[in-house]
Amino acid sequence: MKNTNIKDVFFDLDHTLWDFDRNSELTFEAIFNKNHPTIETKDFIEKYVPINQACWKLYQYDKITHAELRYNRLKHSFDAIDYIISDEEIDSIANDYIRFLPENNHLFDGAIELLDYLKPKYNLHIITNGFADVQFKKLNNSKIGSYFHSITNSEMAGVKKPNPIIFRYALDLAKAQKEFSIMIGDCLEADVQGALDAGLDAIFFNGSNVQVEQNIKQVSHLLELKKYL
């Protein structure tokens, strides 16, 4: 059922529009092929994905620093595949990863079609916990930056989703009202509950088809958002 009151649509970026897992795997593959050719990228990624998610959750609630996030997610992943590597090499990989990640710019299926559909009808915005420089590169390199009227990241706001402050910051930046705004993202806690707690409506991008409460609006494909917007 369409929400006819919405004027401003806020998107998360990673795992919602920008296919983080696919782009991340391609980045690691290029790095390993050049400097660590004995590593099987698939084996590494299998360990890295849940470790990275766990580290991001800690970072989201300020339980680890940015530097600890960058180091821990790699160190723990290499430990998990029993690959001996020095801290200096981990630091080099971390730098290469951040530098090369925005060069791979696969979007989720339907992303461009959806943005083309929404842009004439709504003001579109981004709210992301990602690092500012990297996120701007992702948006520009994937050629979707021009769709958005405002881009809020956690460095600008000083807090991360689901803290309500970042949503208020984004609303102020966008000159939007929470009663006429909606948030779309892949994380139930950070995007959906965070937005709801801040007074915005929300839709869960449930690409993995996890079980959620019936009262949560959800889609499993981006183009399904047309039934709401």
Image (cartoon, grey):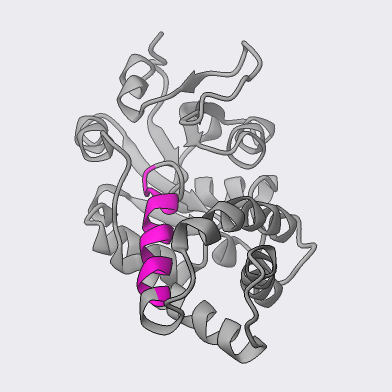
Residue located 66% across and 32% down the image: 193
Determine whether 99 is above or below 195 in the image.
below
Depth check: give the residue in front, 38 or 179: 38
Given the current orientation, which residue lies at the most extreme bottom position?
88
Q: Is residue 106 left or right of residue 160?
A: left
229 or 211, nearer to the observer: 211
**Which quadrant holds the C terminus?**
top left
Q: Is residue 174 visible?
A: no
Residue 159 rendering spot, x and y as whole percentages: 67, 59
Front residue of 128 and 86: 86
- Residue at point 80%, 62% (across, down): 63
Quadrant location, the N terminus: top left
Q: Position of residue 130 (x, y in %)?
A: 52, 60
Residue at 43% across / 24% down in the picture? 220
Nearest the eye: 11 or 188: 188
Image location of residue 165, percent across then percent down? 67, 50
Give the residue displayed 52% in from the left and 37% down from the top. Answer: 186
Q: Is residue 5 magenta?
A: no
Asked whether residue 113 is in view, the answer is yes
State the image quarter where residue 80 is shown: bottom right
- Say left or right for 12 vs 115: right
Q: Main secondary structure of the magenta part?
A: helix
Vertical order, 174 against 122 (above or below): below
Q: Position of residue 38 (x, y in %)?
A: 47, 75
Magenta part of the chain: 17-32
Q: Residue furthest right?
A: 63
Left/right placement of residue 153 relative to residue 174 reads right
* Number of dots carrying numbers: 0
Furthest residue to the front?
38
